[in-house]
Image (cartoon, rainbow, N blue to C red):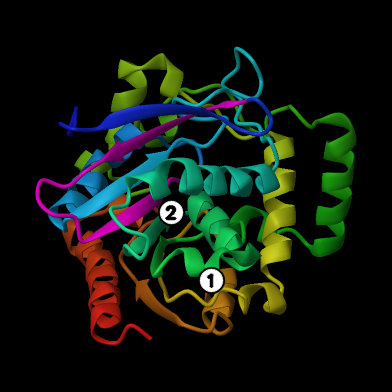
Amino acid sequence: MIEALAGLRWHFLTNDKGYQIRAATIMPHGKAKGCVLLLHGLSEFTEKYYEVITDLIKRDMMVVTFDWVGQGGSENIITNSQKRHTQGFDQDVADIDKIYHELLIPLLPKKDFPKYMIAHSMGGHLGLRYLAEGHADNFAAAAFSAPMLGIASVEAIAAPIRKRIFAFAERMLDKSYVPGGTDWTGLERAMPGHSIFSSDKERDSWQNAWCKKNEKLKDGAATWGWLREAYKSCQYMAQEDILKRITTPVFIAYAGKEALVSNNAITTALKIIPRVKGAFLPLAKHEILMESNNIRNQFWAGFDIMISNLATHPH
């Protein structure tokens, strides 16, 4: 596990709702070839991505990343609680724009400097939504790991029942844990490599290791409020006219052993997004960037080819 990154700078910004966002930037050792905005998944944090950041530095990329409000080193939404609640997905998208304009743009050496996005799971959902909502030209290309365009457990419930459950939860349970949810225990990753997240023993251990080092990084389960907002945003992103607005060149890798997000929603999006290439990784679990080297290398190959193609055929 990489425990520190030389040259990493921490930044603290306040969003439109008054919540503090913890962000980080780092420069490559030589001349930068581009800048990557890195977006994490649910209950993740910057420290967990030190290896990914290192991979990008080796590619001569500047990196800008941040912890979503409600997790990591950013401000909690429910004070003194490990509950992963939500400020609203619309505000999360607004936070991307804040980071883009206030942190990423000032780093760039020139106006037309290449900018890329890499995003995982919930971060992938929010990144795609950001592109769809008028920001497709902000990035030269974007790569996604198992983007949360649908939630597997919710998709398994019949639509009419789903609607009634969320209506009741909104009235009565908004800030309560989802069924079976508790404060952080670390049990879901108690046997690294055998969890639903990754088959790689070492990388699957990093989330718990960091949480034991820093209590602030511990998140329990999501709340009903988070699940409701996530579901609503997934319904919104399922619309064909919304997906067609994503004109950015896009690469999407998705996992054969997926247990958290909906592969059906991903494969549907692959048929609609105008400039998209998909890669199905049959042996991968959900956290593709935290998987074995063979699986991770397939993601990085897709990213590298996309960047190379842009350099050869910019339009």
Any part of residue 192 in sight: no
Indicate the quadrant containing the N terminus: top left, top right, bottom left or bottom right. Answer: top left
Indicate the quadrant containing the C terminus: top left, top right, bottom left or bottom right. Answer: bottom left
Circles 2 and 1, Cβ within 8 Å, touching? The answer is no
Q: Which residues are magenta?
A: 19-41
Q: Is residue 128 left or right of residue 279?
A: right
Question: What residue sits right under mark 2 in the picture?
Answer: 120
Q: In the picture shown, does residue 246 fall above or below 290?
A: below
Q: Residue type at mark 1?
A: Ile
Q: Residue type at mark 2?
A: His
Residue 314's x, y, as percent?
33, 83
Residue 166's x, y, as percent?
82, 46
Q: Is residue 258 left or right of residue 24?
A: right
Disc 1 on helix, strand or loop?
A: helix
| Identity of the residue drawn at 67% across and 35% down | 86
Any part of residue 198 in sight: yes
